[in-house]
């Protein structure tokens, strides 16, 4: 699923960070290209370039100086070579004065013109970062997304298995809720998945028998987090007694779930009466952190037993 964002939304969301002001075209509702197939080799934002018409065209001081060095005819030829249906957003950097030739062109073609006090390099850096987040492919997973022991954990499982109850207990133990029931995930890097909460669900959790609870109102602002990198999936499953007895207690098999072409480690936790799932989840997360740091307790245990056997035999 791809997302779109209009120039009005970009201005509303990031006016403060980008120091933006409208100069022209505020009435023009223009969507920033979000379909990567349509973009081809284009980038999301860059210095003025007729070869990349889809991008937001940044006009820095060098571009202004270059335009000033050209004859009027040459300036017009460069601007008229633009595919204006694709190059419809211009941002002037460094609070520079817009050359008359560009102002007239923008006014005649009815495109958007913004200005910022930031440098062109900063504008390009920030725009590419913000826009890549807005237009990234997203997927919704059923479960509760939380920060546990400092890392992002998706608690998954069949409906009614107790995910929200477990999340509520974890929150009471000092961990933080990101999203209940339907967290959204997007790919923010080659091997990085971030999760966030849909606006309508922000801060709320549903617990069977209690209904909808406002976590922020009950536990304070620190109990809710906006976004986090997904590092681990904990899959809660009901095991039959027969299946429970067949669990390999020394298993070192690693399981993964593919989310947006990124392999995320999965821990399967059997659900049974009397098990303190919150403590087990904390232990699973701590063990995963040790694995990330290169330590495997099972491998260490097996190695120790082998050394003891060899010592006794000798």
Image (spheres, rainbow, N blue to C red):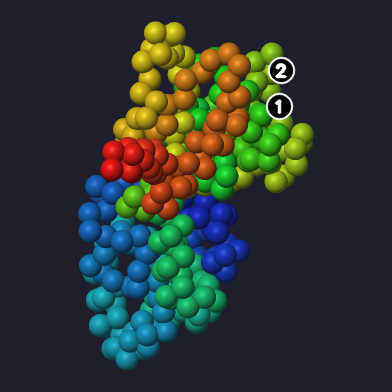
Residue 219 pos. (x, y %)? 75, 37
Q: Is residue 252 left or right of residue 98?
A: left
- Name the residue: 50% across, 36% down: 284
Q: Is residue 185 visible?
A: no
State the residue position of label 2. Answer: 210
Mark 2 falls on what kind of element? loop
- Name the residue: 43% across, 60% down: 129
Whether 48 is drawn above or below 148: the answer is: below
Quadrant holding the C terminus: top left
Name the one closer to the observer, 286 or 193. 286
Q: Is residue 229 left or right of residue 12?
A: left
What label does residue 213 carry, if any?
1
Residue 309 pos. (x, y %)? 32, 37
Q: Residues within 10 Å of mark 1 (few under 14, many from 20)?
A: some
- Name the residue: 53% across, 15% down: 272
Name the one closer to the observer, 146 or 73. 146
Residue 202 pos. (x, y %)? 62, 36
Quadrant holding the N terminus: top left
| Occupied quadrant, residue 81 | bottom left
Q: Is residue 207 visible?
A: yes
- Name the residue: 70% across, 46% down: 222
Q: Residues within 10 Å of mark 2 (few under 14, many from 20)?
A: few
Q: CA distance from mark 1 to mark 2?
A: 8 Å
The answer to whether the residue labelled 1 contacts the one labelled 2, judged by CB atoms less than 8 Å apart, is yes
């Amino acid at each position: 699923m791809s997302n779109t964002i209009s120039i009005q939304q970009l201005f509303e969301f990031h006016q403060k960070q980008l120091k933006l002001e409208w100069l022209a075209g505020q009435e023009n509702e223009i969507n920033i290209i979000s379909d990567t197939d349509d973009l081809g080799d284009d980038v999301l934002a860059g210095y003025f370039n007729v070869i990349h018409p889809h991008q937001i065209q940044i006009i820095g001081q060098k571009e202004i100086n270059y335009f000033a060095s050209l004859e009027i005819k040459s300036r017009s030829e460069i601007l008229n070579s633009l595919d204006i249906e694709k190059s419809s957003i211009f941002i002037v950097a460094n609070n520079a004065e817009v050359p008359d030739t560009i102002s007239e062109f923008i006014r005649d073609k009815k495109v958007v013109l913004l200005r910022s006090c930031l440098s062109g390099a900063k504008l390009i850096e920030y725009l590419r970062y913000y826009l890549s987040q807005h237009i990234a492919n997203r997927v919704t997973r059923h479960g509760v997304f939380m920060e546990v022991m400092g890392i992002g954990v998706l608690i998954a499982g069949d409906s009614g298995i107790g995910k929200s109850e477990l999340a509520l207990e974890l929150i009471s133990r000092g961990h933080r809720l990101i999203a209940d029931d339907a967290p959204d995930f997007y790919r923010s890097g080659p091997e990085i998945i971030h999760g966030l909460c849909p606006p309508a669900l922000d801060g709320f959790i549903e617990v069977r028998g209690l209904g909808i609870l406002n976590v922020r109102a009950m536990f304070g602002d620190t109990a809710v987090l906006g976004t986090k990198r997904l590092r681990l999936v904990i899959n809660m499953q009901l095991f039959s007694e027969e299946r429970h007895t067949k669990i390999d207690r020394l298993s070192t098999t690693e399981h993964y779930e593919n989310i947006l072409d990124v392999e995320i480690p999965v821990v399967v936790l059997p659900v049974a009466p009397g098990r303190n799932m919150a403590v087990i989840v904390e232990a699973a997360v701590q063990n995963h952190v040790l694995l990330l740091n290169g330590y495997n307790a099972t491998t260490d245990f097996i190695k120790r037993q082998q050394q003891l056997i060899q010592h006794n035999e000798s």
